[in-house]
Image: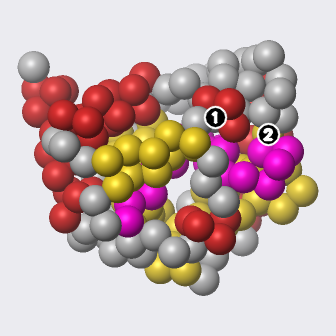
Amino acid sequence: MVQASPINRHRPPATLTIAEGITRNDKDILANHKVCGYASAVVGYNMAVGNGFDDCIILNTKGLVCCTSIANIFAVTDTTIYTPSLQNGCLDGILRKQVLSVIENRGYGVQVGDVSVSQLHTMDAVFITNSITGIRPVQSVDDTTYDIENTILNNIQQGLTQICKK
């Protein structure tokens, strides 16, 4: 049986946790593609939800931030936005590409590369993206809270909305 329901694009800010015991193999040839090997992401998601979070952050085999179980991840500090590179095992998502374009078009600095957990905890704002829910601000990662009304985050959301209206 298949069940369908409307997509809620106005979800509250996400609460995330670092996945324990689940890693993304950043060396796997299929790491950047949606394939059946995403079972560990499903397990991580279920563990996070079972512990009262909305999703989990999956680290790669080097212990660097990769993605969440269902989204790409971005972090903001000052006027620079950080996101893991594809070499870290994250999905080369459609919305990720659009968000990177909006960031550059809006004149913000972007650093695509390694993002450590300790670095993530020092950021002003964090947001996640996927094609179904769009951009979703992150309220917290474990005990670290973020500015969900961050000006840069709001500016990126507005830029993406303008692209989607075209």
Please give the range of residues in magenta. 60-77
Quadrant in the picture for the C terminus: top left
Q: In the image, 144: left or right of 41?
A: left
Residue 77 position (above or below residue 136)? below
Residue situated furthest bottom in the rendering: 143
Are circles 1 and 2 on residues that touch, CB within 8 Å?
A: yes
Q: Amino acid at mark 2?
A: Arg
Residue situated furthest right in the rendering: 21
Q: In the image, 1: left or right of 95?
A: right
Residue at (50, 26) in percent of width and height: 93
Q: In the image, 20: left or right of 162?
A: right
x and y percentages locating residue 111 in the rendered image: 45, 45
Q: Are there few (<14), some (14-19), or many (20+) residues within 10 Å of tag 2?
A: many
x and y percentages locating residue 144 in the rendered image: 55, 80
Q: CA distance from mark 1 to mark 2?
A: 8 Å
Residue position marked by numbered label 2 in the rendering: 24
x and y percentages locating residue 141 in the rendered image: 58, 71
Residue at (63, 34) in percent of width and height: 90
Q: Is residue 26 visible?
A: yes
- Label drawn at residue 90: 1
Give the main secondary structure, helix, strand or loop, of the magenta stretch: strand
